Image: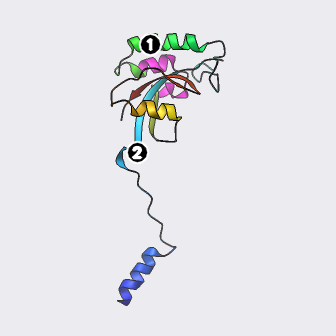
Amino acid sequence: SIKTRSVLAQVSGSRCPRPLKVAPAMSKVRCSHLLIKNVNSRNPVSRRTGQSTEGNSEEAAMKELLDIKAKITPENFAAMAQERSDCGSFKEGGDLGPFAEGEMMQAFWDGTNALKVGEISNPIKTDSGLHLILRTA
């Protein structure tokens, strides 16, 4: 009918906003992390202290991260990230909020996706440094 065509024209016309693409339910994950920067970090400055990390070798950073890994739990993760992480997210206990593939470095995305919610990763190396990741969603 003419009325139906008029309504369809209004709905499909350029004046109507197009529907946003809705991402599939599991396209975003959420995690917290604890980052230790080192001499090889792309930006070797701690966001927690403002100090250079160029004097911290990757080997020393890995040893420190493994020592932390031996003590860290999902329950104390936020406190330990606030105390030691070199990422600006230390203020939020390492929480990075939800993110999708392509929003973080691929190694970080892959490391997060390899975890079940509540699990903590082994050390993950990215251009930023060495991370422990706690998957939270």
- Quarter occupied by the N terminus: bottom left
Amino acid type of disc 1?
Ile
Which residue is at 51% across, 35% downward?
A: 106
Which residues fall within the magenta stretch?
Answer: 79-92
Which residue is at 66% across, 12% downward?
A: 55
Coordinates of residue 83 in the picture (x, y in percent): 49, 16
In this picture, residue 68 sits left or right of residue 118: right
As helix, strand or loop, the secondary structure at mark 1 comes to helix
Residue placed under numbered mark 1 in the picture: 68
Coordinates of residue 118 in the picture (x, y in percent): 33, 27
Coordinates of residue 102 in the picture (x, y in percent): 52, 42
Q: Is residue 91 magenta?
A: yes
Q: Is residue 123 magenta?
A: no
Which residue is at 58% across, 15% downward?
A: 58
Which residue is at 39% across, 80% downward?
A: 7
When asked about the image quadrant of residue 47, the answer is top right
As helix, strand or loop, the secondary structure at mark 2 comes to helix
Residue placed under numbered mark 2 in the picture: 27
